[in-house]
Amino acid sequence: MSDRNFELLIGTYTEGQDPERGIFRAAVTPDGTRIELRGVTSVAPNVDPTWLAASPDGRFVLGAQATGGSGTCHAAVVNGGAHVVAADYVSGSVAAHPIAADGTLGERSGFAQHAGSGPYVERQAGPHAHMIAEGPNGRFVHAIDLGTDTVYAYEIDEASGALIEASRSKLRPAFGPRHLAFHPDGELGYVIGELGFEVAICAYEAATGELDPLAYLPIVDDGVLGEDFPSGIRVSNDGRFLHLAVRGPDTLRTYSLGDPRRPELVSVVPTGGRWPRDIVLSPDGTLLFCSNQQSNDVTVFALDPRTGVPSATGAVLAVPAPSCVIVR
């Protein structure tokens, strides 16, 4: 357990909220039992800080640049802090921007427009880039596209900063991939399907960036589909547990990874709020934070070091429509 308080940076949806509110700062005790607001960073009116990504040295990226797409919903700082790559959900495109030594964000250097559709007509009429994830070896940047049931692997050209497609990995039709988490062994990736109510357990090919689905893990109880919308997915730092959030039933699902290719369910617990848009683990792996968008709060859970099971600490932070959390 950490011997100092954790700092949280919380991104929110500002629509319908005070336009001066946007990114919240909070402090959490090492045991997760107390959380308190420490400040708010305002954003421009009608700008939703949907996703936050900090550079490896902990600094925020400075400046604003256009991605060339629309509906930006996710971003990641990659290449050791040299670039930030963003996923545009509405346009189904991906953009790369260089980051200068002083933290300034440069003009777009790379752009990739996805194309295609999927069989889920209401949600897959076109491409919808939903997440950016850097691969285990740092060579590839992966764009998870919900609309085309595809995970794209890109390299960033060292000289120009252009995005160069290396491979495409297809998932089951109507799977609707949302987010991706890698096992720390670098050999497996877990893709959560927002539309398919499953997790795709994939072998990862480090040489090409391809993800080969080995199995699909259902994440609904008793095989009954309801208004379930899987969202966040995280693997513990030691690779022993897989944590998922599911909107609708508003639950956290924890799986044992004794055999990383065959996750076994160990617990299903309430998030303590409504519509968990994302989850994140503390750097030391002792706490889990859940962003409950519709109940306007962030809930805190302690993780059992033996079983991985999360238990609510009772600490809750009221924030308007939280979408994501950075813990440092």
Image (cartoon, rainbow, N blue to C red):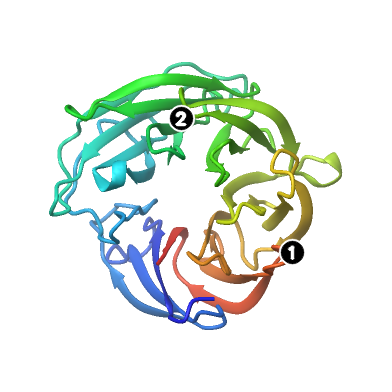
The quadrant where residue 44 appears: bottom left
| Residue closer to the observer: 284 or 150 | 284
| In this rendering, position of residue 271 left or right of residue 20 | right
**SS at mark 1 in the image:** loop
* Tag in front: 1 or 2: 1
Residue drawn at (77%, 40%), measured in percent from left and top?
225
Closer to the camera in the image, 268 or 306: 306
Q: Which residue is mark 2?
A: 128
When asked about the image quadrant of residue 6, the answer is: bottom left
Q: Amino acid at mark 2?
A: His
**Amino acid bearing label 1:** Thr
Residue ranking furthest to the right: 222
Q: Residue 214 at x, y = what percent?
A: 69, 28
Question: Residue 228 versus residue 54: which sits nearer the camera?
Answer: 54
Left or right: residue 2 versus residue 203 is: left
Is any atom of residue 268 visible in this view? Answer: yes
| Residue drawn where x is 64% and y is 21% of the image | 173
Q: Residues within 10 Å of mark 2 (few under 14, many from 20)?
A: many
Graded by Cα atoms within 10 Å as few (under 14), some (14 to 19) or many (20 or more), the crowding at tag 1 reads: some
- Quadrant location, the N terminus: bottom right
Eyeballing the image, is 18 above or below 228?
A: below
- The tag on residue 307 is 1
124 up-or-down from 199: above or below:
above
The residue that appears at 66% across and 54% down in the rendered structure is 240
> Residue 106: which numbered mark, if any?
none
The C terminus lies in which quarter of the figure?
bottom left
Instruction: Give how far across and how far down residue 124 sits, in percent.
Output: 54, 25
Number of numbered discs: 2
Q: Position of residue 213 (x, y in %)?
A: 65, 26
Distance CA(mark 1)–CA(mark 2)? 36 Å
- View extreme (top): residue: 116
